[in-house]
Image (cartoon, rainbow, N blue to C red):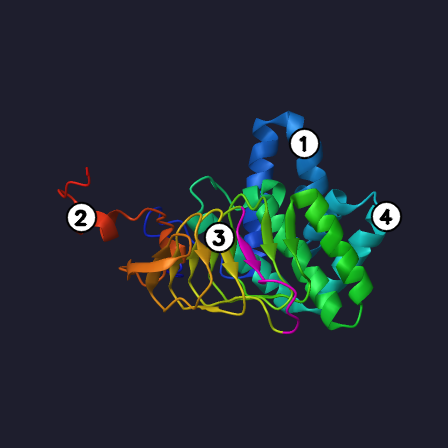
Amino acid sequence: MNHMDTSPETDIPRPESHLDVWEQICSEARAIAQKEPVLNELLHSSVIDRESLEEALSYRISRKLGHHAISEPYLHDLFFDVFRADKKLIEQVRRDIVAIDERDAACESVLFPFLYFKGFQAITAYRVAHYLWNHQRRDIALYLQSIISQVFAVDIHPAARIGSGILMDHATGVVIGETAVVEDDVSMLHEVTLGGTGKVCGDRHPKVRKGVLIGSGAKILGNIEIGEGARIGAGSVVLNNVPPHSTVVGVPAKVVGQERVPVPAYDMDHTLCEILKPLEGLDFNI
């Protein structure tokens, strides 16, 4: 799969701008409101009565994160101000939504991530915290990190650098450390850790390059590089650099093969069937 105008499976046009995404979200919200009147209040307050994707995101996420030390109205205005100040954030949001729609088998519409998927909501809130961190508002950024972790069970340090087109599927238990880098078009599942190895200060977290697929429960530790287009098997503990376009599994993780697709993050195949195929027919009973 690639980022073309249409999906080869469904031939449904993919949104090319955040305005296209917003129009599609509104259309789907109106259709569901007619079909499920019990959801009218949610759909109207979150989508139908909003004027833009920026305003809708600000409302939806502030509703999730408010009612703590900082009020919901303050968070709404804070998020809205950040989205208006940095237009790049909305383009990142659009690419995230399209990535989820293309890669997540449980996603049937672009409305679903916006309303329901905490991985998308958590990374969108992180993007605001990251903006604040980079604009010398580090106390409020750290506050947001704390509340995001409590509400969504996703702990991303606001200094971490994360690209766009990110799928964080299920997302529960994801931890991304302060000096971690996640480039564009990465897919990861729940309970993934991009962490350090101890009390070492400075640049101490992983660098995940474009197109990487990280299986559930994988722990990637230390200032190491996960090469472009690599695949990390579920439950693996990765302590060393991973070559581009390779598959690693195990504790500690070892290279078990070369990738047969250019971008595993698009393919979302977490099995090792192709790699293990040459072993079929061997008798492992000893």
Q: Amino acid at mark 4?
A: Ser
Q: What separation in Å lies between label 3 and label 4 (alpha carbons)? A: 32 Å
Residue 266: image location, x then y, percent: 39, 55
Q: Earlier in the sequence, mark 1 or mark 3?
A: 1
Residue 122: image location, x then y, percent: 64, 51
The residue beneath circle 3 is 188
Q: Establish if 162 lies above or below 269.
A: below
Please indicate, yes or no, whether residue 6 appears anywhere in the rendered image: no
Mark sitting on residue 279 = 2
Mark sitting on residue 284 = none
* Disc 2 packing (10 Å; few <14; some 14–19; many ≥20): few
Q: Amino acid at mark 3?
A: Met
Residue plotted at (72% across, 45% down): 150
Q: How many marks?
A: 4
Q: Is 254 inside the magenta-drawn segment? A: no
Helix, strand or loop status at disc 2: helix
Q: What separation in Å lies between label 3 and label 2 (alpha carbons)? A: 28 Å
Q: Which residues are magenta?
A: 191-202
The residue beneath circle 1 is 40
Q: Are marks 4 and 1 in contact (CB under 8 Å)?
A: no
* Disc 4 packing (10 Å; few <14; some 14–19; many ≥20): few
Q: Earlier in the sequence, mark 1 or mark 2?
A: 1
Q: What separation in Å lies between label 2 and label 4 (alpha carbons)? A: 59 Å
Q: Earlier in the sequence, mark 4 or mark 1?
A: 1
The residue beneath circle 4 is 71
Q: What separation in Å lies between label 1 and label 2 (alpha carbons)? A: 55 Å
Please indicate, yes or no, whether residue 156 appears anywhere in the rendered image: yes
Residue in front for this viewpoint, 124 or 149: 149
Q: Earlier in the sequence, mark 3 or mark 2?
A: 3
**Image quadrant occupied by the N terminus:** bottom left
